[in-house]
Image (cartoon, rainbow, N blue to C red):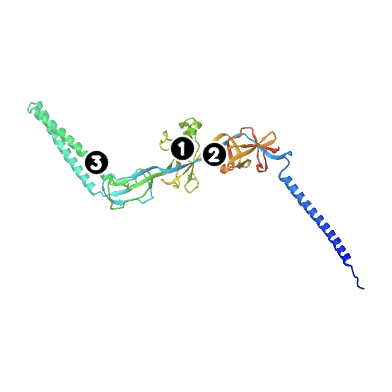
Amino acid sequence: MALFLSPTFATSFNKKTMRKSMITLNRKWIRLIGIVGCTVWMASCKQAPDAGVKSSYAVMQIEPTDKELSSSYSATIRGRQDIDIYPQVSGTIEKLCVTEGQKVRRGQLLFIIDQVPYRAALKTATANVEAARAATSTAELTYKSNKELYAQKVVSEFSLKTAENSYLTAKAQLAQAEAQEISARNNLSYTEVKSPSDGVVGALPYRAGALVSANIPYPLTTVSDNSDMYVYFSMTENQLLALTRQYGDMDEALKNMPEVELQLNDKSMYGEKGRIETISGVVDRNTGTASLRAVFPNKNGLLYSGTSGNVILPVTMKGSLVIPQATTFEIQDITYVYKVVDGKAQSAPVSVTRVNGGQEYIVNDGLKEGDIIVAEGVGLLREGTPVKVNKTKRK
Protein backbone atom coordinates (compact mmCIF):
# COMPACT_ATOMS: atom_id res chain seq x y z
CA MET A 1 0.00 0.00 0.00
CA ALA A 2 1.45 3.27 -1.02
CA LEU A 3 2.24 5.88 1.64
CA PHE A 4 1.34 9.42 0.75
CA LEU A 5 2.68 12.43 2.74
CA SER A 6 1.07 15.76 2.65
CA PRO A 7 3.14 18.74 1.41
CA THR A 8 2.90 20.42 4.82
CA PHE A 9 4.33 17.43 6.67
CA ALA A 10 7.26 17.08 4.20
CA THR A 11 8.23 20.72 4.54
CA SER A 12 8.21 20.52 8.35
CA PHE A 13 10.39 17.39 8.28
CA ASN A 14 13.05 19.00 6.04
CA LYS A 15 13.33 22.08 8.27
CA LYS A 16 13.93 19.99 11.39
CA THR A 17 16.61 17.91 9.62
CA MET A 18 18.47 21.03 8.38
CA ARG A 19 18.34 22.64 11.85
CA LYS A 20 19.99 19.59 13.43
CA SER A 21 22.71 19.55 10.75
CA MET A 22 23.53 23.26 11.28
CA ILE A 23 23.81 22.77 15.05
CA THR A 24 26.22 19.85 14.57
CA LEU A 25 28.34 21.86 12.08
CA ASN A 26 28.56 24.89 14.37
CA ARG A 27 29.75 22.74 17.26
CA LYS A 28 32.57 21.34 15.10
CA TRP A 29 33.72 24.85 14.06
CA ILE A 30 33.68 26.06 17.64
CA ARG A 31 35.86 23.12 18.70
CA LEU A 32 38.32 23.77 15.80
CA ILE A 33 38.58 27.49 16.59
CA GLY A 34 39.15 26.67 20.24
CA ILE A 35 41.98 24.24 19.43
CA VAL A 36 43.73 26.75 17.10
CA GLY A 37 43.41 29.54 19.67
CA CYS A 38 44.97 27.41 22.40
CA THR A 39 47.85 26.44 20.12
CA VAL A 40 48.59 30.07 19.22
CA TRP A 41 48.39 31.12 22.86
CA MET A 42 50.81 28.38 23.95
CA ALA A 43 53.27 29.27 21.17
CA SER A 44 53.18 32.94 22.11
CA CYS A 45 53.83 32.02 25.70
CA LYS A 46 56.94 30.12 24.69
CA GLN A 47 58.33 32.89 22.45
CA ALA A 48 57.77 35.80 24.79
CA PRO A 49 58.00 34.71 28.39
CA ASP A 50 56.35 36.80 31.00
CA ALA A 51 58.49 39.76 31.92
CA GLY A 52 58.01 38.89 35.52
CA VAL A 53 59.49 35.37 35.13
CA LYS A 54 63.29 35.13 35.29
CA SER A 55 64.89 32.96 32.60
CA SER A 56 68.27 31.30 33.11
CA TYR A 57 71.15 32.56 30.93
CA ALA A 58 74.86 31.88 30.94
CA VAL A 59 76.78 35.01 31.87
CA MET A 60 80.44 35.97 32.08
CA GLN A 61 82.41 38.39 34.21
CA ILE A 62 84.80 40.73 32.40
CA GLU A 63 88.41 40.49 33.51
CA PRO A 64 91.57 41.87 31.87
CA THR A 65 93.85 39.46 30.05
CA ASP A 66 96.94 39.63 27.83
CA LYS A 67 96.10 39.12 24.17
CA GLU A 68 98.55 38.59 21.32
CA LEU A 69 97.52 40.23 18.08
CA SER A 70 99.22 40.43 14.70
CA SER A 71 99.61 43.40 12.39
CA SER A 72 100.35 43.11 8.68
CA TYR A 73 102.61 45.48 6.75
CA SER A 74 103.26 45.53 3.00
CA ALA A 75 106.90 44.72 2.32
CA THR A 76 109.49 44.47 -0.45
CA ILE A 77 112.09 41.70 -0.47
CA ARG A 78 115.72 42.32 -1.38
CA GLY A 79 118.88 40.27 -1.22
CA ARG A 80 121.40 41.06 1.49
CA GLN A 81 123.18 42.92 -1.28
CA ASP A 82 122.33 43.32 -4.96
CA ILE A 83 125.55 44.20 -6.77
CA ASP A 84 125.41 45.62 -10.30
CA ILE A 85 128.40 44.38 -12.28
CA TYR A 86 129.98 46.97 -14.62
CA PRO A 87 133.21 46.49 -16.58
CA GLN A 88 136.19 48.58 -15.50
CA VAL A 89 137.78 48.51 -18.96
CA SER A 90 136.44 48.86 -22.49
CA GLY A 91 136.41 46.08 -25.04
CA THR A 92 134.39 43.33 -26.62
CA ILE A 93 133.06 40.46 -24.55
CA GLU A 94 135.08 37.40 -25.47
CA LYS A 95 133.32 34.84 -23.30
CA LEU A 96 130.37 34.46 -20.91
CA CYS A 97 131.28 32.09 -18.11
CA VAL A 98 127.91 31.89 -16.30
CA THR A 99 124.21 31.53 -17.06
CA GLU A 100 121.22 33.41 -15.69
CA GLY A 101 120.11 32.18 -12.28
CA GLN A 102 123.39 30.37 -11.61
CA LYS A 103 124.74 30.34 -8.08
CA VAL A 104 128.26 31.74 -7.91
CA ARG A 105 130.95 32.09 -5.27
CA ARG A 106 133.00 35.12 -4.47
CA GLY A 107 135.85 35.48 -6.99
CA GLN A 108 134.22 33.22 -9.59
CA LEU A 109 134.78 34.28 -13.21
CA LEU A 110 131.72 35.82 -14.88
CA PHE A 111 132.96 37.41 -18.15
CA ILE A 112 136.16 37.68 -20.15
CA ILE A 113 136.78 40.86 -22.16
CA ASP A 114 139.20 40.82 -25.11
CA GLN A 115 142.67 40.77 -23.52
CA VAL A 116 144.92 41.30 -26.56
CA PRO A 117 145.28 45.12 -26.34
CA TYR A 118 145.76 44.99 -22.59
CA ARG A 119 148.48 42.34 -22.80
CA ALA A 120 150.29 44.53 -25.33
CA ALA A 121 149.94 47.56 -23.07
CA LEU A 122 151.42 45.58 -20.19
CA LYS A 123 154.42 44.53 -22.26
CA THR A 124 155.03 48.14 -23.26
CA ALA A 125 154.76 49.29 -19.67
CA THR A 126 157.17 46.57 -18.53
CA ALA A 127 159.70 47.62 -21.19
CA ASN A 128 159.40 51.24 -20.11
CA VAL A 129 160.16 50.23 -16.56
CA GLU A 130 163.30 48.41 -17.63
CA ALA A 131 164.46 51.40 -19.67
CA ALA A 132 163.74 53.79 -16.81
CA ARG A 133 165.57 51.54 -14.38
CA ALA A 134 168.66 51.51 -16.64
CA ALA A 135 168.56 55.29 -17.03
CA THR A 136 168.30 55.65 -13.29
CA SER A 137 171.36 53.45 -12.74
CA THR A 138 173.37 55.53 -15.23
CA ALA A 139 172.26 58.79 -13.63
CA GLU A 140 173.18 57.42 -10.20
CA LEU A 141 176.72 56.50 -11.33
CA THR A 142 177.20 59.93 -12.91
CA TYR A 143 176.04 61.67 -9.77
CA LYS A 144 178.31 59.62 -7.49
CA SER A 145 181.28 60.20 -9.82
CA ASN A 146 180.72 63.96 -9.90
CA LYS A 147 180.36 63.99 -6.16
CA GLU A 148 183.86 62.46 -5.71
CA LEU A 149 185.34 64.77 -8.31
CA TYR A 150 183.77 67.78 -6.63
CA ALA A 151 185.36 66.71 -3.35
CA GLN A 152 188.72 66.77 -5.13
CA LYS A 153 187.80 70.15 -6.64
CA VAL A 154 188.02 68.70 -10.16
CA VAL A 155 184.49 69.65 -11.21
CA SER A 156 182.43 72.67 -10.35
CA GLU A 157 179.43 72.78 -8.08
CA PHE A 158 177.24 73.38 -11.13
CA SER A 159 178.31 70.06 -12.64
CA LEU A 160 177.55 68.29 -9.37
CA LYS A 161 174.09 69.85 -9.14
CA THR A 162 173.36 69.00 -12.76
CA ALA A 163 174.30 65.35 -12.19
CA GLU A 164 172.19 65.25 -9.04
CA ASN A 165 169.14 66.66 -10.84
CA SER A 166 169.54 64.17 -13.65
CA TYR A 167 169.61 61.37 -11.11
CA LEU A 168 166.46 62.64 -9.38
CA THR A 169 164.70 62.98 -12.75
CA ALA A 170 165.61 59.42 -13.66
CA LYS A 171 164.24 58.16 -10.34
CA ALA A 172 160.96 60.01 -10.96
CA GLN A 173 160.69 58.59 -14.43
CA LEU A 174 161.27 55.11 -13.04
CA ALA A 175 158.51 55.58 -10.50
CA GLN A 176 156.18 56.82 -13.25
CA ALA A 177 157.01 53.84 -15.44
CA GLU A 178 156.38 51.46 -12.55
CA ALA A 179 153.00 53.08 -11.89
CA GLN A 180 152.08 52.70 -15.55
CA GLU A 181 153.06 49.05 -15.36
CA ILE A 182 150.82 48.55 -12.34
CA SER A 183 147.95 50.27 -14.16
CA ALA A 184 148.50 48.12 -17.25
CA ARG A 185 148.60 45.00 -15.11
CA ASN A 186 145.37 46.02 -13.34
CA ASN A 187 143.64 46.76 -16.63
CA LEU A 188 144.60 43.30 -17.86
CA SER A 189 143.17 41.76 -14.69
CA TYR A 190 139.96 43.78 -15.15
CA THR A 191 139.34 41.95 -18.42
CA GLU A 192 138.38 39.00 -16.23
CA VAL A 193 135.15 40.15 -14.56
CA LYS A 194 134.66 38.23 -11.31
CA SER A 195 131.86 38.00 -8.77
CA PRO A 196 132.44 40.26 -5.75
CA SER A 197 130.35 38.04 -3.44
CA ASP A 198 128.43 34.81 -3.14
CA GLY A 199 125.05 35.03 -4.78
CA VAL A 200 122.84 34.36 -7.76
CA VAL A 201 123.41 35.73 -11.26
CA GLY A 202 120.65 37.93 -12.62
CA ALA A 203 119.83 38.81 -16.23
CA LEU A 204 122.55 38.80 -18.88
CA PRO A 205 121.67 41.56 -21.36
CA TYR A 206 125.07 41.43 -23.16
CA ARG A 207 126.38 38.50 -25.16
CA ALA A 208 129.75 37.51 -26.59
CA GLY A 209 130.97 40.05 -29.13
CA ALA A 210 129.18 43.01 -27.56
CA LEU A 211 131.25 46.16 -27.06
CA VAL A 212 131.11 47.28 -23.44
CA SER A 213 132.64 49.97 -21.27
CA ALA A 214 132.31 51.49 -17.82
CA ASN A 215 129.62 53.84 -19.17
CA ILE A 216 127.18 51.26 -20.53
CA PRO A 217 123.51 52.01 -19.65
CA TYR A 218 122.82 48.61 -18.09
CA PRO A 219 125.11 46.44 -15.96
CA LEU A 220 126.62 43.28 -17.36
CA THR A 221 124.55 41.46 -14.74
CA THR A 222 123.50 41.68 -11.10
CA VAL A 223 124.75 39.32 -8.43
CA SER A 224 122.32 39.01 -5.54
CA ASP A 225 123.51 37.67 -2.21
CA ASN A 226 120.38 35.68 -1.26
CA SER A 227 121.78 33.73 1.67
CA ASP A 228 119.82 36.09 3.91
CA MET A 229 117.01 38.31 2.64
CA TYR A 230 116.27 41.86 3.71
CA VAL A 231 112.55 42.64 3.95
CA TYR A 232 111.70 46.34 4.04
CA PHE A 233 108.40 47.70 5.37
CA SER A 234 107.08 50.96 6.82
CA MET A 235 105.27 52.12 9.95
CA THR A 236 103.28 55.28 10.43
CA GLU A 237 104.42 57.88 12.93
CA ASN A 238 101.74 56.81 15.45
CA GLN A 239 102.67 53.15 15.16
CA LEU A 240 106.32 54.03 15.68
CA LEU A 241 105.48 56.08 18.77
CA ALA A 242 103.42 53.22 20.21
CA LEU A 243 106.31 50.82 19.60
CA THR A 244 108.77 53.16 21.29
CA ARG A 245 106.51 53.61 24.32
CA GLN A 246 106.00 49.87 24.63
CA TYR A 247 109.73 49.09 24.88
CA GLY A 248 111.10 52.37 26.23
CA ASP A 249 113.43 53.26 23.33
CA MET A 250 114.47 52.01 19.91
CA ASP A 251 117.49 50.04 21.13
CA GLU A 252 115.36 48.11 23.62
CA ALA A 253 112.72 47.57 20.94
CA LEU A 254 115.27 45.97 18.60
CA LYS A 255 116.55 43.74 21.41
CA ASN A 256 113.20 42.61 22.76
CA MET A 257 110.80 42.64 19.80
CA PRO A 258 109.45 39.17 18.99
CA GLU A 259 110.26 37.33 15.79
CA VAL A 260 108.22 38.29 12.75
CA GLU A 261 106.66 36.16 10.02
CA LEU A 262 106.54 36.68 6.28
CA GLN A 263 103.45 36.16 4.12
CA LEU A 264 104.41 35.61 0.49
CA ASN A 265 102.60 37.11 -2.47
CA ASP A 266 100.53 33.93 -2.98
CA LYS A 267 99.22 34.31 0.63
CA SER A 268 101.24 31.34 1.88
CA MET A 269 103.40 31.72 4.99
CA TYR A 270 107.17 31.48 4.69
CA GLY A 271 108.56 28.64 6.76
CA GLU A 272 111.30 30.62 8.53
CA LYS A 273 110.86 33.45 11.01
CA GLY A 274 112.89 36.64 10.94
CA ARG A 275 113.98 39.46 13.20
CA ILE A 276 113.82 43.22 12.83
CA GLU A 277 117.38 44.52 12.54
CA THR A 278 117.03 48.24 11.94
CA ILE A 279 114.50 51.03 12.44
CA SER A 280 115.00 54.25 10.53
CA GLY A 281 115.53 57.27 12.74
CA VAL A 282 113.88 59.58 10.21
CA VAL A 283 110.20 59.84 9.27
CA ASP A 284 109.70 60.56 5.59
CA ARG A 285 108.08 63.98 5.34
CA ASN A 286 106.20 63.00 2.18
CA THR A 287 104.71 59.70 3.34
CA GLY A 288 104.77 60.20 7.11
CA THR A 289 106.29 56.75 7.59
CA ALA A 290 109.55 55.30 8.88
CA SER A 291 111.34 52.37 7.25
CA LEU A 292 112.12 49.13 9.08
CA ARG A 293 114.25 46.21 7.92
CA ALA A 294 113.79 42.58 8.90
CA VAL A 295 116.17 39.78 7.94
CA PHE A 296 115.03 36.25 7.04
CA PRO A 297 117.23 33.21 6.36
CA ASN A 298 116.96 31.83 2.83
CA LYS A 299 118.62 28.44 3.00
CA ASN A 300 116.29 26.84 0.46
CA GLY A 301 116.41 29.78 -1.95
CA LEU A 302 112.64 30.22 -1.88
CA LEU A 303 112.87 34.01 -1.58
CA TYR A 304 113.91 36.10 -4.57
CA SER A 305 115.22 39.63 -4.62
CA GLY A 306 112.68 42.08 -6.03
CA THR A 307 109.55 40.22 -4.89
CA SER A 308 106.94 41.45 -2.39
CA GLY A 309 104.95 40.17 0.56
CA ASN A 310 103.62 41.12 3.99
CA VAL A 311 105.45 41.21 7.30
CA ILE A 312 103.33 39.85 10.17
CA LEU A 313 104.33 41.57 13.40
CA PRO A 314 102.93 40.10 16.66
CA VAL A 315 101.81 42.62 19.26
CA THR A 316 100.88 41.75 22.85
CA MET A 317 97.95 43.77 24.22
CA LYS A 318 98.33 43.71 27.99
CA GLY A 319 95.28 44.07 30.22
CA SER A 320 92.80 43.78 27.34
CA LEU A 321 89.09 43.12 27.86
CA VAL A 322 88.26 40.26 25.49
CA ILE A 323 84.73 38.98 24.79
CA PRO A 324 83.46 36.28 22.40
CA GLN A 325 81.59 37.35 19.30
CA ALA A 326 78.54 35.37 20.52
CA THR A 327 78.02 37.83 23.38
CA THR A 328 77.30 40.71 20.99
CA PHE A 329 74.63 41.81 18.57
CA GLU A 330 74.50 44.63 16.05
CA ILE A 331 71.91 47.29 15.29
CA GLN A 332 72.66 49.71 12.44
CA ASP A 333 76.38 48.85 12.49
CA ILE A 334 76.64 49.53 16.24
CA THR A 335 77.78 46.64 18.43
CA TYR A 336 75.92 45.99 21.69
CA VAL A 337 76.14 43.61 24.63
CA TYR A 338 73.63 42.87 27.37
CA LYS A 339 74.96 43.79 30.79
CA VAL A 340 73.26 42.26 33.82
CA VAL A 341 72.32 45.16 36.09
CA ASP A 342 70.18 44.51 39.17
CA GLY A 343 69.12 41.15 37.75
CA LYS A 344 67.92 42.61 34.44
CA ALA A 345 69.33 42.72 30.92
CA GLN A 346 70.52 46.18 29.96
CA SER A 347 71.88 46.81 26.48
CA ALA A 348 75.15 48.74 26.23
CA PRO A 349 77.00 49.91 23.09
CA VAL A 350 80.64 48.89 22.92
CA SER A 351 83.59 49.87 20.73
CA VAL A 352 85.49 46.74 19.71
CA THR A 353 88.41 45.51 17.61
CA ARG A 354 87.88 42.19 15.85
CA VAL A 355 90.60 39.56 16.36
CA ASN A 356 91.07 35.88 15.50
CA GLY A 357 89.03 36.17 12.34
CA GLY A 358 86.15 37.90 14.14
CA GLN A 359 85.64 35.10 16.69
CA GLU A 360 86.70 37.39 19.52
CA TYR A 361 86.53 41.12 20.18
CA ILE A 362 88.83 43.38 22.17
CA VAL A 363 86.72 45.98 23.92
CA ASN A 364 88.05 49.49 23.47
CA ASP A 365 85.20 51.26 25.25
CA GLY A 366 81.84 50.48 26.87
CA LEU A 367 82.82 47.81 29.42
CA LYS A 368 85.03 47.77 32.49
CA GLU A 369 86.59 45.15 34.68
CA GLY A 370 84.02 43.34 36.82
CA ASP A 371 81.04 43.92 34.52
CA ILE A 372 78.77 40.91 34.01
CA ILE A 373 77.32 40.33 30.55
CA VAL A 374 75.07 37.69 29.02
CA ALA A 375 77.29 35.11 27.32
CA GLU A 376 74.74 33.14 25.30
CA GLY A 377 71.31 33.61 23.78
CA VAL A 378 71.50 37.39 23.42
CA GLY A 379 69.24 37.18 20.35
CA LEU A 380 66.30 36.10 22.55
CA LEU A 381 66.66 38.89 25.08
CA ARG A 382 64.85 42.19 25.29
CA GLU A 383 65.64 45.33 27.19
CA GLY A 384 64.77 44.85 30.86
CA THR A 385 64.29 41.08 30.68
CA PRO A 386 64.89 39.54 34.13
CA VAL A 387 68.00 37.34 34.03
CA LYS A 388 68.65 34.45 36.37
CA VAL A 389 72.37 33.68 36.43
CA ASN A 390 72.87 30.15 35.19
CA LYS A 391 76.65 29.99 35.12
CA THR A 392 79.34 32.60 35.39
CA LYS A 393 82.22 32.35 32.93
CA ARG A 394 85.40 34.22 33.65
CA LYS A 395 87.29 35.70 30.75
**x and y percent of residue 111 in the render?**
31, 49
Amino acid under disc 3: Ser
Tag of residue 345 = none
User: Of the residues tagged 3 and 2, which is closer to the observer?
Assistant: 2
**x and y percent of residue 269 in the render?**
50, 46
User: Of the residues tagged 3 and 1, which is closer to the observer?
Assistant: 1
Say which label, 3 or 1, has the lower sequence index: 3
Amino acid under disc 2: Leu
Quadrant hosting residue 14 = bottom right
Looking at the image, residue 151 lies above or below residue 9: above
10 Å crowding of disc 1: few (<14), some (14-19), many (20+): some
Quadrant hosting residue 24 = bottom right
Residue lying farthest left? 154
Answer with left or right where residue 370 lies relative to residue 144: right
Name the one closer to the observer, 358 or 226. 358
- How many angstroms separate mark 3 from mark 2 (CA)? 61 Å
Name the one closer to the observer, 98 or 395. 395
Amino acid under disc 1: Met
**x and y percent of residue 68 in the render?**
55, 38
Answer with left or right where residue 85 lies relative to residue 346: left
User: Of the residues tagged 2 and 1, which is closer to the observer?
Assistant: 1
Label 1: which residue?
Answer: 235
Tag of residue 183 = 3
Label 2: which residue?
Answer: 69
- How many angstroms separate mark 2 from mark 1 (CA)? 16 Å
